[in-house]
Image: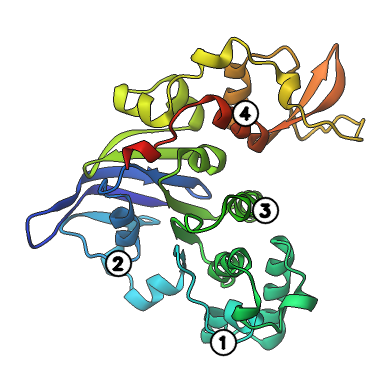
Amino acid sequence: MIKFENVSKVYGDGTVAVDSLNVEINQGEFFVLIGPSGSGKTTSLKMINQLVPLSDGMIYINGKKIHDYDIYELRWNIGYVLQQIALFPHMTIEQNITVVPEMKKWSKEKMKKRAYELMEMVGLDPHIYADRKPHQLSGGEQQRVGVIRALAADSEIILMDEPFSALDPISREKLQDDLLHLKNNLKKTTVFVTHDMQEALKLADRICIMKDGKVVQVGTPYELIHHPVDEFVQQFVGGKSDRFGEDFQLKKILVRTEETNVNDHLRVVNVSASLHEVLEKLSEDERLQVEENGKLIGFIDRRATIQYLSKNVRGRGQSNE
């Protein structure tokens, strides 16, 4: 889907922001770029939609060089979410969401339907919020609008540059949950930049850890936790879970529910499973059903597990900023 082939970015003063980046992002994948300040993660993101020009190498989208796309067409077909959401203050929320669809000359009916379904997906009742102006929304609500505005035109690719870093912890967690819901329902190819390892572990299908403009390791959350390539990755992730996995009990983070029927679509994990087993399965699935003696006793999801990890793993990368 998106391929970086020996991509470099060198600024006029000789600063090397990105050095020979080789990464491939798959169709429908949620791919996170993370690293200390100055690692090149945001520069790498911005080169995808040509906000930052390449110095060397090439980026391909669906096998086509980005330079072969009309730049306006390229950007129209890539949703972009920034840390600071710039909503148009004089427009309603519905109008803000449908800016690009309107430029693409969608019908009014189609635009309204799209705006309403996206607002509902992130818990904003369209009958309440559609006609409001941005100043009538909280910071977290505005950020949700910014996220779904990037999705409104049904773009193949979504770029997100630290979209939640300015929010309070409660709003941030809610938006992460919204994004997981959108991810599971819309299956968009998403490139997400963050400095927060907890956020990366919670959201990512795969994570790319960068340092000094180079890739240090690419892998699933499970692979980075259990098979770090060096001490930098181990410290950045927070250390192997083996240090606290011995005392792990799945019942501690079990999500109990009134449901009693087995869900054929969910993979099963036994209540006696180790943290290693749980993380391995959650690297592929957002939610698992937990059984004891062959009977369903509840569920475990990535969110609950990450919350457990956050209480036991030191660091998370912020100390490396």
| Residue 234 as seen in the image, left or right of residue 240 | left
Looking at numbered disc 3 in the image, what kind of residue is underneath it? Asn
Q: Residue at x 45, y 67 (%)?
A: 84
Marks 3, 4: nearer the viewer = 4
Of the two numbered discs 1 and 2 in the rendering, the one whose residue sits closer to the viewer: 2
Residue 204 position within the rendered picture, expressed as x and y whole percent measured from the top left? 51, 41
Query: In the rendered image of this protein, does residue 22 appear above or below residue 230?
Result: below
Quadrant of residue 146 in the image? Answer: bottom right
Q: Earlier in the sequence, mark 3 or mark 4?
A: 3
The kind of secondary structure element at disc 4 is helix
Residues 302 and 132: in front is 132
- Residue 312 in the image: x percent, y percent? 55, 24
Residue 185's disc is 3
Residue 105 - label:
1
Q: Which residue is mark 2?
A: 50
Q: Is residue 30 visible?
A: yes
Residue type at tag 2 = Gln
Q: Amino acid at mark 1?
A: Lys
Q: Earlier in the sequence, mark 1 or mark 2?
A: 2
Give the SS element for disc 2: loop
Per the model, the C-alpha gap separating discs 3 and 1 is: 25 Å
* Comparing labels 4 and 2, the label whose residue is closer to the camera: 4
Compared to residue 50, the image places residue 239 above or below, namely: above
**Residue 65 visible in rendering:** no
Residue 308 disc label: 4
Label 4 and label 2: CA atoms lie apart by: 39 Å
Give the side of residue 249 with respect to residue 18, left or right. Answer: right
